[in-house]
Image (cartoon, rainbow, N blue to C red):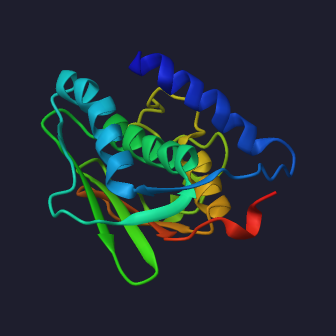
């Protein structure tokens, strides 16, 4: 069921890239934590099989959003999927959730290989795939769409996606979602 859900999410996500399409958003009120916990449950089996510790947010936060829940879920799925994919066995992926007066900050931190500064803009473009750690032209399996989908979703939600990374130590992807997001894009 989880794999099917991810396939459906990918199919839906591809709609985001149709020429200049601005899909209408379905706004609803929900706790951001519910979506994050759902994504943790979804990826926990894959993380276990890969010998990766997947940690959900520690501190309880109310963190309510008025946003497109499916798009927020898609954004979180793509960031966590990417982190799990690039984290070696024995590594850790940590999700965090914080809020301020106007936004919810969601982050995904991994202990993967990190991203060289010259690639940090490229990773958000369609079909870009970073070389696997160790080089030799090998690549991590995947479509190369995950981070581009995440970036597009963040833009549609009126949010911002960025990263901090240190080569050899890992990366942290941050998403700032306005608590009342996406209103400018509602059809």
Image coordinates of residue 5 in percent, x first then y, are 49, 23
Outermost residue toward the front in this view = 29
Image coordinates of residue 22 in percent, x first then y, are 80, 53
Q: Is residue 133 visible?
A: no
In the rendered view, would you say 99 is above or below 12?
below
Residue at the image point whose x is 66% and y is 33% from the top: 12
Residue at the image point whose x is 49% and y is 71% from the top: 179
Q: Quadrant of the N terminus?
A: top left
The image quarter in which residue 121 lies: bottom right
Residue situated in front as seen by the camera: 164 or 79:
79
Residue at the image point whose x is 28% and y is 25% from the top: 46
Q: Quadrant of the C terminus?
A: bottom right
Residue at the image point whose x is 54% and y is 41% from the top: 146
Q: How many marks?
A: 0
Residue situated in front as seen by the camera: 108 or 184:
184
Task: State left or right for residue 134 relative to residue 45.
Answer: right
Task: State left or right for residue 165 relative to residue 90.
Answer: right
Q: Is residue 19 visible?
A: yes
Image coordinates of residue 117 in percent, x first then y, are 46, 66
In the rendered view, would you say 101 is above or below 78?
below
The image quarter in which residue 132 lies: top left
In the rendered view, would you say 187 is above or below 62?
above
Task: State left or right for residue 72 relative to residue 158.
Answer: left
Image coordinates of residue 113 in percent, x first then y, are 30, 49
Outermost residue toward the bottom in this view = 101
């Amino acid at each position: 069921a989880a794999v099917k859900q991810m396939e459906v999410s990918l199919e839906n996500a591809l709609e985001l890239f149709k020429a200049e399409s601005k899909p209408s958003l379905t706004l609803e009120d929900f706790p951001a934590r519910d979506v994050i916990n759902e994504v943790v449950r979804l990826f926990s089996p894959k993380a276990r099989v890969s010998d990766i510790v997947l940690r959900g947010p520690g501190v309880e936060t109310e963190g309510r959003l008025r946003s497109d829940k499916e798009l927020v879920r898609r954004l979180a799925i793509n960031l966590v999927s990417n982190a799990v994919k690039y984290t070696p066995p024995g590594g850790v992926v940590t999700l965090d959730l914080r809020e301020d007066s106007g936004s919810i900050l969601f982050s995904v931190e991994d202990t993967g290989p990190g991203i060289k500064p010259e690639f940090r803009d490229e990773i958000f473009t369609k079909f870009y795939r970073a070389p696997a750690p160790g080089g030799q032209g090998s690549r991590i399996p995947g479509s190369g769409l995950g981070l581009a989908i995440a970036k597009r979703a963040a833009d549609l939600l009126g949010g911002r996606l960025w990263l901090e990374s240190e080569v050899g130590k890992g990366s942290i992807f941050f998403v700032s979602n306005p608590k009342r997001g996406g209103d400018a894009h509602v059809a």
